[in-house]
Amino acid sequence: MRNPLSDKVVGIQPSGIRKFFDIVSEMKDAISLGVGEPDFDTPWKIREEGIYTLEKGRTYYTSNSGLKDLRVEICSFLKRRYGLIYDADEETFVTVGGSEAIDLAFRAMLNPGDEVIIPQPSYVSYLPCAVLADGVPVIINLKEENEFRLTGEELLSAITPKTKILVLPFPNNPTGAVMTKENLQEIADICIDKDIFVVSDEIYSELTYGGKHCSIASIPGMKERTIVINGFSKSHAMTGWRLGYACGPNNIIKQMVKIHQFAIMCAPTNSQYAAVEGLRNCDADVENMRTEYDRRRKFMLTKLRGMGLKCFEPFGAFYIFPNIAKFGLTSEEFAMRFLEEHKVAVVPGTAFGDSGEGFLRMSYASSLNNLKTAMERLEIFIKSLN
């Protein structure tokens, strides 16, 4: 029998996060700081609208681009929050989570051999999605001394005549790093000069602390060369509802919708109706969740630094990225021993790229009580290593 498998797919490594989830799921009294998922319930107004939608029998397909009302609300949200102006019909469409939008953007834009610049550490899907779209990933290893921000010098050093797309993963998973408007202006100037497109993953845009999120698409000259990707999973605690969206130039969006049409048809109808309610009436719920995350963020930073761990201050998402290199263990060894000996799951930094070696990703999307217990166990573990 001939080999039934694609060499390209077989060559892609599985996520480095999953095995820790699998172990902790069967471990009694374990605490997981590895899940990138809000621990809050979806706000009641959203759930209530979802229930009402089902009771009304609104379970049919929507248009491929998504409900018109939702697209209108998405555009309204982006305008009032970030000053971004998009047409609901021509430049906006609804996806099955932000991850589908990333996949579609690459498939719609890349020809075989086109290079995709991916700053790391970053979300695990960028590299495999680029490979599956026949792109060539080019990695930029972000530096702790720069607070894991992308610099213009780093970007210039990675550009070749084959460069087509820059992935801009900020606010960042796993580091919590953000890019200021001044940082983005430097990147934008290079992208315009070198004629590079940007896929800007802004799924954590509503979870920023100490300042408002700025989108690179708001910088003059960048809207026409940027795909903005966002969604409801993190901001509205709607992970299982599977709903995201993409906004960008019509010629790109049109091709993304075409792939979506053949592969998916449309995002879940029930989720779309619920998200309309979320954008119209749940700003206060989002703000309350952000305030609580900020409280946990400050607690984690204080505790980790108090244990003598080097840890820069994250200003976005709900992760913290302490440096554990001084213990002489790899990130994987540290995470596995911490899990096996003290029943706390964290994620090795290497799950997000080679530059994550020597770091751990800890999620503070968990209750403060869990975080306190986890930090107590970490302190005991660190003392045993010393």
Image (spheres, rainbow, N blue to C red):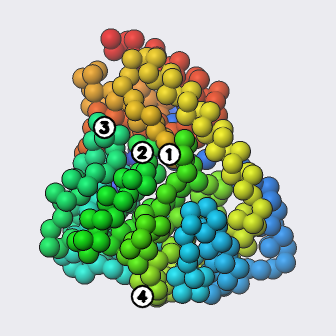
User: Cβ–Cβ below 8 Å for labels 2 and 4?
Assistant: no
User: Cβ–Cβ below 8 Å for labels 2 and 1?
Assistant: yes
Q: Which residue in the structure is indicated by mark 3? A: 144
Which callout, 1 or 3, points at the residue further toward the start of the chain? 3
User: Cβ–Cβ below 8 Å for labels 4 and 3?
Assistant: no
Which callout, 2 or 1, points at the residue further toward the start of the chain? 2
Circle 2 SS class: loop
Q: Which residue in the structure is indicated by mark 1? A: 316
Circle 3 SS class: helix
Which callout, 2 or 3, points at the residue further toward the start of the chain? 3
Q: CA distance from mark 1 to mark 3?
A: 15 Å
Which callout, 4 or 3, points at the residue further toward the start of the chain? 3
Q: Local crowd at mark 1 within 10 Å, few (<14), some, or many (≥20)?
A: many
**The C terminus appears in which quarter of the rendering?**
top left
Residues 85 and 48: in front is 85
Which amino acid lies under the numbered mark 2 shown in the image of this protein? Ala
Q: CA distance from mark 2 to mark 4?
A: 31 Å
Q: Position of residue 92 (x, y in %)?
A: 55, 79
Q: CA distance from mark 4 to mark 1?
A: 31 Å
Is any part of residue 265 visible from this angle? no
